[in-house]
Amino acid sequence: MTDRPIDPDVDLHVPAQRAELHWPVPAAIAAGGALGALARHAAQTALPVEVGGFPWATFLVNVSGCLLIGVLMVTITEVRRAHRLVRPFLGVGVLGGYTTFSTYVVDVQRAVAAGAPVTGLVYLAATMLAALAAVAAGMWLTRRVAGVRAGAGAR
């Protein structure tokens, strides 16, 4: 077992920070997760995928979710301090429920099984590249708009 905290923002040796581990955090995550999952369901209903086709809904959900996580993390760590439930609600809950990298893997498997290995491989690579680029873009754009330097602490 390690002495490192579960969340790098929480020091379990400080009594006031131990309170983060009580019911409000899981409740915030659950509420956010429900909202994120509903948003993902709406996107996947609006953009259904054909057998062997490119799963645009999952691709767009994952890329937009990664962009938003880049925006969120810079905002709450470098731009301004946020309430202690913002990160669990928005980051883990809403964006965790919204993005779906498990469905991404299943979509790749389905494309290959449907006889469309090129679609599966393109989707596999495009999602990873676009998701990483989206996080970086979200971070860069947020810093640029907020006028903060990388690594600067929250105000």
Image: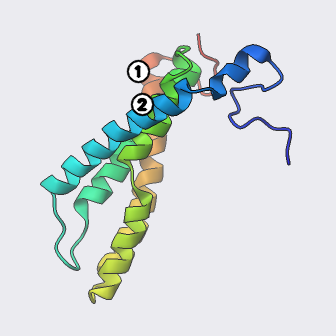
Q: Nearer the viewer, residue 144 or 68?
A: 68
Measured as percent of width and height from the top left, residue 137 is found at 43, 40
Q: Nearer the viewer, residue 72 or 97?
A: 97
* Contact check, label 1 and label 2, Cβ < 8 Å: yes
Which secondary structure lies at badge 2? helix
Relative to 22, does residue 123 appear above or below in the rendering? below
Q: Nearer the viewer, residue 24 or 84?
A: 24
Task: Residue at 57%, 21% (x, y): give it.
Answer: 78
Task: Residue at 37%, 52% (x, y): give it.
Answer: 62
Residue bearing mark 1: 145
Measured as percent of width and height from the top left, residue 103 is found at 37, 63
Q: Residue furthest front?
A: 23
Decide if residue 99 is in sight here.
Answer: yes
Residue bearing mark 2: 141
Residue type (three-letter) at the residue carrying disc 1: Val
In the displayed structure, does residue 77 sit left or right of residue 51? right
Quadrant for residue 142, please give it.
Answer: top left
Mark 1 to mark 2 CA distance (whole Å): 6 Å
Few, some or many residues within 10 Å of mark 2 (<14, 14–19, 20+): some
Task: Residue at 39%, 45% (x, y): give it.
Answer: 97
Relative to 121, does residue 16 appear above or below in the rendering? above
Q: Residue furthest top?
A: 155
The quarter of the picture where the C terminus appears is top right
Which secondary structure lies at badge 1? helix
Task: Residue at 31%, 50% (x, y): give it.
Answer: 61
Residue type (three-letter) at the residue carrying disc 2: Leu
Relative to 50, does residue 73 appear above or below in the rendering? above
Quadrant for residue 144, please give it.
Answer: top left
